[in-house]
Image (cartoon, rainbow, N blue to C red):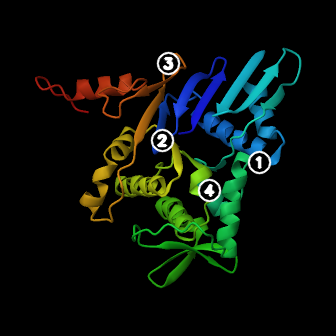
Amino acid sequence: MPKVKVSIPGLMQGEIELEGITILMGSPMTGKTTLLRLIYDLTYVKKNIVMPKELYHIANEFLEKGKIEISLDDLKIECNKEETENPVCSMYNSFTSYNAILFPSEMEYIIKYNYAPDFESYNEFMDLINELRAGTVGYYKIPLPDLIETEIASENHRLVEKGDGKSIDVTISSSTAIKLGFIIKVMKDGLLPDPKTTILLFDDPQANMHPEYQIKLAYILNKLAEFGYKILVTTHDLNFLTMLACSNSIPEVMKLEKFNPQTKRLYIIDNSRQIQEYSLLSSSIPTYDTLYKLYSECTKAKHPKKC
């Protein structure tokens, strides 16, 4: 299984094994999104034999002096910086070669307005949008049951939401229709690369979704993992964590086609900025202490208080 190691002074340090569905949590501003982008940048360097400008930008922002290290198996990049100089980044020779696609936290708005930040980690996602607009059909089609009432489709090279005999422009579609519909369409049309060598990076994908559809998203992630994709997903949502932890029961509860049980692993960036692995069944997740105290205070049996 692929192993990611990262060391960014003052931000995070540790390693993550990508197996089945890997979940990354932690407080805000601990570098979860940055880690996803760095993993993409690793695959970009190997594929294009050029350092992405995003990598230099990250190194410049987080380093005053010192070294950033990020590796995926034997594929490794180091960025060194002295106090008054720009960072210098280099890649070590490697036999490792992966594709990666980042599904960014802003995916709803990128799909609606066809605009993304000018960084390399958004390239593959924009390619998917353009392929959908063009009506492209790929090789690795993944069959899915009907999970939502509408679908994303292409009409005259623009994306629309279709349902009940109507078509509306995606700019006025709901978050659920956009995000779930887009992922479903990409899967059904076979637009993702070879699952044997592809890592899918999902940044807070459940945001703005009703819990019913978050469960369906968890189902989709399991179907992707069953097909062979390595999944790394970040979230702040304890409910979504529960959905992923209990997702082997989703087909029975929602009367959906079954999938083979997938391995799930949970990693937390703790308050010391170390990446630690935890059980999905942990009764207490680090960095959520205030929330647990609030629940405890609100639900005391002897003297219940208004929540």
Whether residues under marks 4 and 2 lie with C-beta atoms below 8 angstroms apart, the answer is: no
Q: Residues within 10 Å of mark 2 (few under 14, many from 20)?
A: many
Left or right position of 284 against 234: left
The answer to whether residue 27 of the structure is visible from this angle is yes
Please, is residue 157 above or below residue 222 in the view? below
Alpha carbons under labels 2 and 1: distance apart: 23 Å
The kind of residue on which mark 2 rests is Glu
Tell me the SS state at disc 3.
loop
Disc number placed over residue 109 in the picture, else none = 4
Residue lying farthest to the bottom in this orientation: 165
Where residue 159 appears, x then y in whole percent?
Answer: 63, 72
Where residue 48 appears, x then y in whole percent?
Answer: 81, 47
User: On the image, numbered disc 3 is attached to which residue?
Assistant: 271
The quadrant where residue 210 appears: bottom left
User: On the image, numbered disc 1 is attached to which residue?
Assistant: 47
The kind of residue on which mark 1 rests is Lys
The quadrant where residue 152 appears: bottom right
The answer to whether residue 119 of the structure is visible from this angle is no
- Report the front residue among 176 and 80: 80
Q: Residue at x 70, y 58 (%)?
A: 126
